[in-house]
Image (cartoon, rainbow, N blue to C red):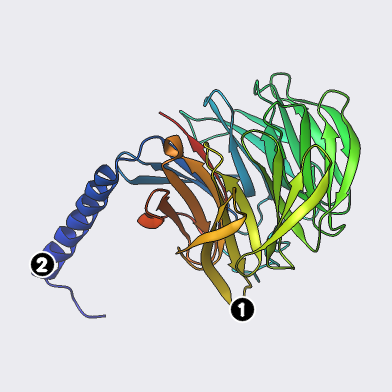
Amino acid sequence: MRNISSKAVTALRLATVVALAIGFGLARAAGMTGFAYSGNERDASISEIALATGQVRTFTIPIMPHNVQVTPDGAYLLAVGMPAGDHGKDGAQPAPGTPPMHEMKADEEGKLLVFDVRNLEKPAATLPAGEHPAHVVTDRQGRRAFVTDSGENRIIVLDLARHSVIGKVRTGAYPHGLRPSPDGRELYVANVEAGSVSVVDTKALKEVARIPVGKGPVQVAFTPDGHQVYVTLRDENAVAVVDAATRRVIGKIAVGRNPIQVYATPDGKTMYVANQGTAENPDDKVSVIDVATRKVIATVTTGAGAHGVVVGDAGRTAFVTNVEAGTVSAIDTASQQVNMTFKVGAGPNGITYRKE
């Protein structure tokens, strides 16, 4: 190996300092606030992005997180996934929208980790999350968590204060993404293999309807008024629009290849859809849908394997995880341009936002 001169070392250090300074400067220029968190499945970690400065901190955790969620009060970060085995292996990428089966401890079930956002070094609590957990959301008070158990075709309901399982609800085949209605009375759950969405009563803890939507539904998103639900159809390269009152599909919108997650802006005007593509041919596009016209009004290029999406920063920014690129893109919702890209852990999937 060649010796590196002291001048070269100095230059390298200077370049690093300059790069960090530029990153921090861009973050300040973008005017973003709050924190974004990604669940990095391939190296069993979570990354915290301080948006005001652009600083990224990544923490190794005991599971391979497929999804993360901040509680409504911003005090806790929830992460779900299978126990991590050999973090160093680089296994095959799973089908878009499904957790990888490699590197798992076959004799253990999935876990829900609860972190105090002030201490991401170690979980404050570890709860059971079923045979194969995918996504997690909470109720409006942050008292209960709902986890999709794809392996057992059910939702597991957890009491976050008592750290206990308080219910299990049957769904369609391979439940994956889920979101609560704005009033908190119902959960809509995307059943990937059943081609349907389960409607779950959050008080009675039972499925009250099952809506056929199309091929490969992965995630759902309510409009803020609760009138419509958008459902990504991975195997149709489309998004289905469901009328929440009649529980019927009222339209479909063509988007990019293999759409995975979808999220609405707080004003209800637009939906952001992350299109992951395939492992062999990743997509790097985010489709922006106008809710009023049900048409794609913009397509934003992010990074390879666009997967998770959340809108934060008071609606000014959409954050997208790029599985293959190992990055998070910040999209300005006014200009529909990427204004920042953050390097996070390997294989980022789920993403969530916490305000200051």
C-alpha gap between disc 2 and disc 1? 43 Å
| Residue beneath the point at 65% across and 20% down | 141
Q: Residue 291: image x %, image y %?
A: 59, 48
**Where in the figure is residue 284, as x and y percent of width and height?**
51, 68
Q: Residue furthest left?
A: 7
Q: 10 Å neighbourhood of mark 1: few (<14), some, or many (≥20)?
A: few
Residue beneath label 2, please? 6
**Closer-to-camera residue (181/130):** 181
Under tag 1, what secondary structure? loop
Tell me: residue 160, above or below residue 107.
above
Residue topped by disc 1: 280
For the question of whether residue 108 can be seen, the reply is: no
Amino acid type indicated by mark 1: Glu
Residue pictured at 22% horizontal, 47% vertical? 25
Q: Nearer the viewer, mark 2 or mark 1?
A: 1
Q: Which residue shows up at 22% across the image and 57% down it?
A: 19
136 lies left or right of 37? right
Element under disc 2: helix
